[in-house]
Image (cartoon, rainbow, N blue to C red):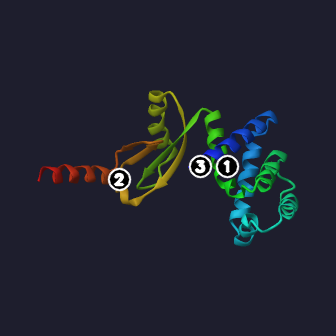
Amino acid sequence: MANETLARRYATAVFGLAREHDAVEAVGEDLAAIDDAISSNDASQRFFLAPIIDRKEKEAVLTGAFSRAHTVALHTVLLLVRKRRERLLHELVRQYFVLEREARGEEPLTIESARELPDSEVRALVAPLERAYGKRFEITQRVDPALIGGVRLLMGDRVIDGSVAGRLQELARTLHGKN
């Protein structure tokens, strides 16, 4: 939780700088690319996170490797190195995207179904929710064959379970409670 709070503070500052430079999307993409590049390779991850490697050496390697990244993104990573907070990078990127989504006025909505839903069905599900909640949603679809049929919607801490599996579980709980 402490890392999440600290990463949120860094992300808020970085997001503000990105807005000033009118580069919110570019900075986010570059931060994600840097995080992916570092975490996708064990050797680069060990190098980046190793406390015994000189900070100046890390800065030189990162500057060379990510010279094409937006200045705000690159300097964010270099700041984490200078402050010995390299472990915050992944959470900082996650928090940055939360801030970006909030700035667009969107909330995450996950649609779980037994099969991939066509766009028309997704729109038919989401449109009434957007009207009812007065919000726009950033939609993620997940396929879970265990649902058998129907859909399960996840909105923040709210779950709307209209799946066959969910209804069977509800029925089982009801029957078990009456015995």
Q: Which residue is mark 1?
A: 92
Residue shown at the point (82%, 36%) measured from the top left? 21
Q: Nearer the viewer, residue 105 or 35?
A: 35
Which numbered circle lies on residue 149?
2
Please give the name of the residue rendered at 70% of the width and 60% of the height, measured from the top-left corner: 36
Please name the amino acid that badge 3 sits on: Ala
**Residue that numbered label 3 is attached to:** 2
Residue farthest along the left direction in this orientation: 179
Which of the pair 52/149 is nearer the observer? 52
Residue 80 x %, y % = 76, 53
Residue type at numbered disc 2? Gly
Q: CA distance from mark 1 to mark 3?
A: 12 Å
SS type, badge 3: helix
Q: Residue at x 82, y 49 (%)?
A: 75
Q: Residue 121: percent from the left, percent from the top?
A: 46, 43
Q: For the residues marked 2 and 3, what is the alpha-carbon distance in whole angstroms?
A: 40 Å
| Quadrant of the image occupied by residue 125 | top left
**Of residues 147 and 52, which is closer to you in this image?**
52
Residue 104: name its quadrant: top right
- SS under mark 2: loop
- Looking at the rendered image, the disc whose residue lies closer to the viewer, 2 or 3, is 3
Mark 1 or 3, closer to the camera: 3
Q: Residues within 10 Å of mark 2 (few under 14, many from 20)?
A: some
Q: Is residue 120 left or right of residue 35?
A: left
Position above or below: 51 against 171: below
Q: Quadrant of residue 14?
A: top right
Compared to residue 154, the image places residue 131 above or below, namely: above
Question: Residue 17, how many percent across, how many down?
Answer: 78, 38
Q: Earlier in the sequence, mark 2 or mark 3?
A: 3
Give, as a three-letter code, the residue at label 1.
Leu
Q: Secondary structure at mark 1?
A: helix
Q: Nearer the viewer, mark 1 or mark 2?
A: 1
